[in-house]
Image (cartoon, rainbow, N blue to C red):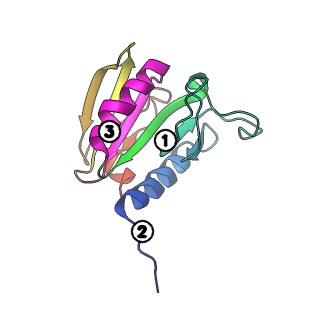
Amino acid sequence: MQKILPTQQLTNLCAADYLINLLAGLALIRIQDPIALSYNSEPEPDIAVVQIDPRLYQDFHPAPDNIFLLIEIADTTLETDRKRKAPAYAKAGITDYWILDVNTRQVYVFREPGEANYRQETVFNEDDVLSMLAFPEIEVQVGRLFP
């Protein structure tokens, strides 16, 4: 019998595969692995786009200086991702944070981190194209992030 994955897991796999292909040789895509925001905070975002490390972060977790982009996949967690995780990521200095809303097939993009939260939040629809701050020349088709 074939196992059917929940939409959130399918989106995580689909988005990660798409980003792996887009960023081959430019960045490492980590899936649900810890990052180090501070001494006592090591969240596990759904996807982290980080600098390539030849040792694949065996001895340490990527810190904000190593992180190009963090992505959370939201099915039932949109409010938590927006109201709890976004402020924590902003406070740590993560410059580019996205939430993929599987229910509306939209991407919430948070930029310009401040001390309490992000100063900029933009919502992109399935037909839109956007770019990461770290790789502005690479176009990301929103619809390709979803299954």
Instruction: Check the image and name the residue furthest to the bottom.
Output: 1
Q: Residue 147: x and y, percent?
A: 36, 61
- Residues at marks 1 and 2, CA–CA distance in whole angstroms: 19 Å
N-terminal of the pair, mark 1 or mark 2, is 2
Using a 10 Å C-alpha cutoff, classify the residue at mark 3 as few (fewer than 14 neighbours), some (14 to 19) or many (20 or more): few
N-terminal of the pair, mark 3 or mark 2, is 2
Magenta segment includes 105:
no
Looking at the rendering, which quadrant does residue 29 occupy? top right
- Residues at marks 3 and 1, CA–CA distance in whole angstroms: 13 Å
- Range of magenta residues: 77-103
Q: Which residue is mark 2?
A: 5
Q: Which residue is mark 3?
A: 80
Kind of residue at badge 1? Pro
Residue at x 60%, y 45% (from the top left corner)? 24
Q: Secondary structure at mark 1?
A: loop
- Number of numbered discs: 3
Query: Is disc 3 in contact with disc 1, using a CB cutoff of under 8 Å?
Result: no
Q: Which residue is mark 1?
A: 45
Instruction: Check the image and name the residue furthest to the top.
Output: 115
Q: Is residue 16 above or below residue 107?
A: below
Q: Secondary structure at mark 2?
A: loop
> Which tag is nearer the camera, tag 3 or tag 2?
3
Residue at x 47%, y 87% (from the top left corner)? 1
Kind of residue at badge 3? Thr
Q: Residue 128: x and y, percent?
A: 27, 42
Left or right, residue 68 beside residue 108: right
Query: Is disc 1 in contact with disc 2, using a CB cutoff of under 8 Å?
Result: no
Kind of residue at badge 2? Leu
Q: Residue 3: x and y, percent?
A: 45, 77
